[in-house]
Amino acid sequence: MSTCYIPNTLDELGGALGHLTKDSLILAGGTDLVLKIRSKYLYPDILLSLSDIPELREIRITPEQAVIGSMSTMHQVELALDGLEDLQALADAAGGVGSPQIRNKATIGGNVANASPAADTPSVLWALNAQVDIMGPGGVRRSVPIQQFFADGKTVLSLGEVILSFTIDRTALTGWRSAFVKLGHRSQVTISRIGMAMALRQDASGVIQDARVVVGAIKPIPFPLPAAEDILRGNLPDPCLAEALGATFRGNTRRAYKEAAAKGVFEDVLLRFQKN
Amino acid sequence: MRLNFFVNDAPVSLEVDPQRRLLDILREDLELTGTKEGCSEGECGACTVIMDGLAVHACLTLAAQLQGRHVTTIEGLEKNGELDILQRCFVEEIAIQCGFCTTGMIMSAKALLLHNPNPTEEEIRTALSGNLCRCSGYVQIVNAVSRAARELGGEV
């Protein structure tokens, strides 16, 4: 039987992290890990469950920043951020993951740490310039920009490190609005074939002053699309730009249908900026 | 590990492998076989139970995540020998064919009505989007949930 650690505080967590070996597993929501344990017949020496640390489930939002605990479920993230214009993309992405049952358990920390190319929240966190707050053995903390968190289809987490939270500087997002749209095989309970996070800063007449486009589910890690950002700047977020924007996908994917589908995804995401 | 949690409001204390699934604890250790195992990977929703007020997959929940939690299964809905209104409405609307998805459907619907006593049809469909019925009885299922909400008159 595995040794099981279920810390109740961050101090206890710091202690438990020091015991982990390469054969240990860290359990967040379990919606991916349980499948992996069963399909690969994994039997960890230590199973560390993050379920019972209240601080990891906290979401604190002020006008200056948003701090989202890594064990916040997709459902909690959607509830907390829906309607906040700068952070709307994160609510969109969290609210579109899986089914209600999945959203009630899957966590934002697990979504990022699992580093699946098809994950929805990493591209949004990238577009919002989130910091990943990390704890290691003994409670040692560090922060890494999300853009530097993924490497070789994995993450920069070392043995015994976990994500504590994501911090988004909202002062840098003043005047920005964001949205996320994904393309899947159906509307619900579907894995992204394209995930698109867009953030725009518009002037009073709606003209785009600055733009960020980050795409997921195409390459091993999310990637920005500066060519699309250039097209957006100086224009209104009009869906008629979708044709030109879609063309910026060329060369970024080996799947021809994704090149064609990108136009539709741009159209959908631009429509999200129509409503005021 | 020693697991202490609640199933259908009754305290349960078990010595279990931390990697044991809630589904196996319910079906094999506690002999509550109303919760069904379908796909075993969180796609079909047959194993849906309510944990701390929210619908979750028993097949993706491990003992290590259950300490102190309150789990409600289909067996916990019947009170004093009377079916829950959702169970009765599923029978009366003929929202059951083979029945394998039914308990999961009812638990997802129950979780919906706990939080939203007056759901729209779209909200019902979203709440049931993680539950598959291969006999294709979605119309009757949605009708059953609507009717239960109507009969409850916004009270759960």
Image: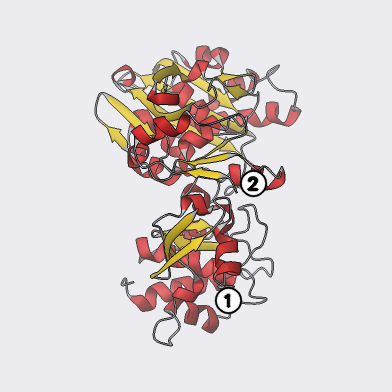
Q: Nearer the viewer, residue A10 or B108?
A: A10
Residue A225 left/right relative to A131? right
Secondary element under disc 1, as helix, strand or loop, is loop
Provide residue A221's location: percent of width, then percent of height: 60, 23
**Residue A273 seen in the figure:** no
**Residue position for label 2:** A35
Camera-side residue of A236 and A270: A270
Q: Secondary structure at mark 2?
A: helix
| Residue drawn 39% across the image and 57% down it | B68
Chain under callout 1: B
**Front residue of A243 and A132:** A132
Q: How many marks?
A: 2
Label drawn at residue A197? none
Position above or below: A218 against A187: above
The residue closer to the viewer here, A122 or B151, is A122
Q: Residue B56's spot in the image, x, y percent?
A: 50, 56
Q: Quadrant of residue A211?
A: top left
Identify which amino acid the numbered label 1 is placed on: Ala
The residue pinned by badge 1 equals B95
> Where's the C terminus of chain A, which quadrant?
top left
For the point 37% across and 37% down, which residue is it? A56
Q: Crowding near pointer 2: few (<14 within 10 Å), some, many (20+)?
A: some
Residue type, numbered disc 2: Leu
